[in-house]
Image (cartoon, rainbow, N blue to C red):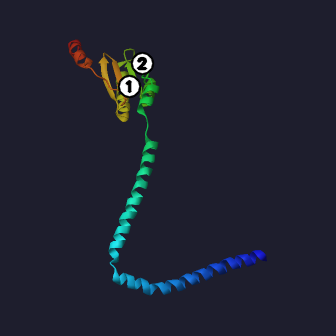
């Protein structure tokens, strides 16, 4: 029962406090109305708003700095950890093309030698690899007779070997 009395006493105290505040608010209202009539209130409100905005902006900047620091990634470390690889393939059947495409998806350059496969299968393989390279945003280049270099988007190939090879091939045909 003592707990029940304490509980009732707690709420009874709070009700009395609210009642006292309500009475004091009624007493203060006439005085506040007189002050409002005598002074220009909107200026005070503008000053308060500006000071509040000035206080809140630095807090936002601190939070933005923390977020920026958390989102920073050092690209140099990632480059040093990944070694460059060029995978060499000499497919014998069309089904070997899937392995080449998997290496391209893993962002590795591939060199494909099609000299040991018939022309029809070689054309199918090149068509498949062209689609794969296009899908990943890479490039495919002919670097020799029946030899192709397929590169993903993170590998850049510089040079003009293909222009030199076009002239001898035209003579052979």
Image position, residue 76 (x, y; %): 41, 30
Asked whether, in this view, residue 4 is left or right of residue 143, the answer is right
Q: Secondary structure at mark 1?
A: helix
Quarter residue 113 falls in:
top left
Of residues 96 and 8, the one nearer the viewer is: 8
Question: In the image, what residue occupies the spot 58% across and 84% down?
Answer: 19
Of residues 11 and 161, the one nearer the viewer is: 11
The quarter of the picture where the C terminus appears is top left
The vertical placement of 45 against 103, above or below, is below
Asked whether, in this view, residue 23 is left or right of residue 55, the answer is right
Q: Residue furthest right?
A: 1
Q: Is residue 7 visible?
A: yes
**Mark 1, residue position:** 125
Q: Residue 152, which numbered label?
A: none
Image position, residue 120 (x, y; %): 35, 22
Label 1 vs label 2: CA separation? 15 Å
Quarter residue 116 falls in:
top left
Q: Residues within 10 Å of mark 1 (few under 14, many from 20)?
A: many
Asked whether, in this view, residue 25 is left or right of residue 64, the answer is right
Of residues 113 and 43, the one nearer the viewer is: 43
């Amino acid at each position: 029962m003592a707990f029940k009395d304490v509980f009732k006493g707690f709420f009874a105290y709070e009700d009395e406090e609210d009642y006292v505040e309500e009475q004091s608010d009624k007493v203060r209202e006439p005085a506040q109305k007189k002050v409002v009539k005598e002074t220009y209130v909107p200026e005070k409100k503008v000053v308060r708003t500006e000071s509040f905005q000035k206080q809140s902006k630095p807090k936002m900047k601190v939070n933005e700095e923390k977020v920026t620091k958390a989102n920073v990634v050092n690209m140099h470390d990632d480059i040093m950890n990944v070694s460059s690889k060029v995978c060499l393939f000499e497919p014998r059947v069309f089904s070997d093309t899937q392995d080449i495409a998997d290496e391209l998806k893993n962002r590795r350059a591939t060199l494909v030698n099609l000299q040991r496969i018939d022309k029809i299968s070689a054309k199918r393989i090149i068509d498949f690899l062209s689609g794969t390279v296009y899908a990943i945003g890479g490039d495919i280049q002919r670097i020799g007779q029946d030899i192709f270099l397929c590169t993903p988007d993170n590998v850049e190939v510089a040079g003009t070997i293909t222009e030199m090879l076009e002239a001898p091939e035209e003579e052979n045909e």
